[in-house]
Amino acid sequence: PLLQALRCYFDIVPGEAAAITRTKIEEKVRYLDKSESKLLPALQDIFTIEATDEEYLHLEPLQKKARIFEAVKDLILMESRIKPLLIIIEDCHWTDKPSEALLTYLLDSLSSARVMFVLVYRPEWNHPFSNRSNYTQIRLNELPPNMSAELITFILDDGETDNVLQQFAIDKAGGNPLYLEELLHNLQENGYIRKDKKYLLAANPSEIKVPSSLQTIIAARIDRLEPDAKHILQIAAVIGRDFNYRILENLIGNKQELKPYLLNLQRNEFVYEIGPTAETHY
């Protein structure tokens, strides 16, 4: 997650030449610190660019790790002296142990700096920050029924919704807004929602079978894609959450067909923005 934030900070585009990445890092670091200190070799190492510093190259792995941690800390600290920083990291429950160790180091060493970390995570993440004085938890509870009803109206193009459909969706979603959104898409794609003067259920609620979890409901939607679109989505997801159009284009091979499929995936909310880099939704 911190590597993704650093890519954004240095304006590094996935797939670009190593020489361009090296130049971007050097220019940014020189702007912050004319002496370049010890930051460059460690930052180059993070982005798998061969460091030119002989001293750094001969360090032991644990020493390199310490230098990388220190370089990220110093970079954030120097930037925070220019302006206050807000660093947002989502999906922390998927964070690996090395990233968690770096995050812990940063939170401890930057506690007096003008830096705020906002960590978004699911309740099951057992993090080591709970007892720290600089940590505050803001718990997001389940979406209440009245707000769930508003979300249903929004998802269904601000149309009036029948009470039976509304209650069915609210009961099934249990306050989970993403599940509620996917449930409504699932019902629409399976023909269980029809529009008369208002949106209605097209079958008896007891006869409607819906996937029991968010993962299965998304998997069911993916399975209904045509084979070529599904194949493209799978390859894009393997590249990463953010994927480079050119890399995907080279892997697919059929360049003429890629753009229409991506536009279709975007309409179906499987892909966000399409440009030099795009982002998979799932």
Image (cartoon, grey):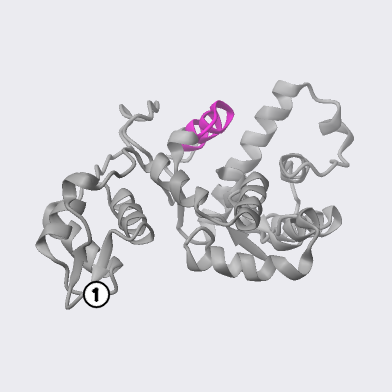
Examine the image and state in which quarter residue 277 appears.
bottom right
Query: Bounds of the magenta span?
Result: 95-107
Tell me the residue that label 1 is attached to.
158
Examine the image and state in which quarter residue 62 appears.
top right
Q: Is residue 174 magenta?
A: no
Pointer 1 local density, CA inside 10 Å: few below 14, some 14–19, many at least 20:
few
In the image, taking residue 151 as reference, residue 52 lies left or right, namely: right
Q: Quadrant of the N terminus?
A: top right
Point out residue 101 in the picture as x, y percentages from the top left corner: 53, 28
Instruction: Please state which of residues 54 and 230 is positioned toward the viewer in this rendering.
Output: 230
Point out residue 131 in the picture as x, y percentages from the top left corner: 30, 27
Amino acid type at circle 1 is: Asp
Q: Is residue 103 magenta?
A: yes
Instruction: Please state which of residues 145 and 42 is positioned toward the viewer in this rendering.
Output: 145
In the image, taking residue 185 as reference, residue 171 lies left or right, namely: left
* Residue 155 shows in the view: yes
Q: Secondary structure at mark 1?
A: loop
Looking at the image, residue 282 lies above or below residue 199: above
Point out residue 141 in the picture as x, y percentages from the top left corner: 21, 44
Provide the major secondary structure of the magenta segment: helix
Residue at (56, 67) in percent of width and height: 264
Q: Residue furthest bottom?
A: 197
Looking at the image, residue 108 lies above or below residue 236: above
In the image, taking residue 280 as reference, residue 38 lies left or right, namely: right
How many numbered marks have been drawn onto this rendered protein structure? 1
Instruction: Please state which of residues 223 and 110 is positioned toward the viewer in this rendering.
Output: 223
